[in-house]
Amino acid sequence: MSEDPDRARPGGPAAGQGNRMRPTSPASLVVAALVAAAGSWLLINRFYGDLPRLNWLPGLTLGALAGAEGIAAFTTKARIDRRPGTPRVDPLLVARFVVLAKASSLAGAIFAGVYGGALLWALAEQGRLLIAEQNLGPSVAGCVGSLALTAAALLLERSCRVPDPPDDPEAGPPPVGGTG
């Protein structure tokens, strides 16, 4: 069994690279939303008579969650940047925020797809079916709330990034001008 000695050694060049968390890919969120939209539209088109009328509450709840995550993003960024008047940041809280942001961005994209599919169906059937007209407003609210949640989650994830380390303060200021 041949094993890379650098990988086995703590602090080696390849140590921990496989376990790094990557930023959420917007392309994967778009794919999730498109798949959810297609599935939603197909299911609603097939079973529209058996589905209940859409409610305003989920869309408003998604919007409220987006607001909470937006506020968390703003305060977390201020704390990580050590702006005056802000308390020190708890690293465990930041890690939890990252997990919340990654989950919320995917959930928001999926909900945006589901509500987007419902919105497309309601727009297509608006003049023919009363249920389509009744579902139009809640579909718009759900779609907007879902997109806002996705954007706030991506903002929260970005605000949790560790800043670049400052230059070495013991090295002194960089030289100004030439040597003479």
Image (tube, grey):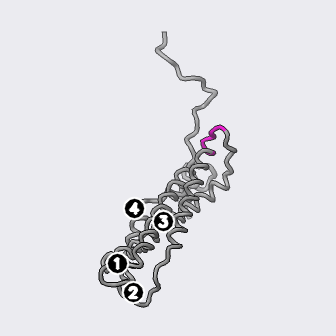
Residue located beneath label 2 in the image = 48
Q: Where is mark 1, residue-wise?
A: 121
**Mark 1 is on which residue type?**
Trp
Residue at screen point 45% across, 63% down: 147
Amino acid type assigned to the residue bearing label 2 in the image: Tyr
Looking at the image, is mark 4 or mark 2 earlier in the sequence? 4
Asked whether the viewer can see residue 161, the reply is yes
Left or right relative to 25: residue 89 = right
Alpha carbon distance from label 4 to label 2: 30 Å
Instruction: State which tag comes first along the sequence, 1 or 2.
Output: 2
Which tag is nearer the camera, tag 4 or tag 2? Answer: 2
Inter-mark Cα distance, 1 to 4: 24 Å
* Cα gap from disc 3 to disc 4, whole angstroms: 20 Å
Cα distance between the residues tagged 3 and 1: 18 Å
Relative side of 165 to 34, left or right: right
Secondary-structure class at tag 1: helix
Which secondary structure lies at badge 2? loop
Residue 79 versus residue 44: which sits nearer the camera? 44
Report x, y in % for residue 52: 47, 85
The magenta region covers 79-84
The residue under label 3 is 145
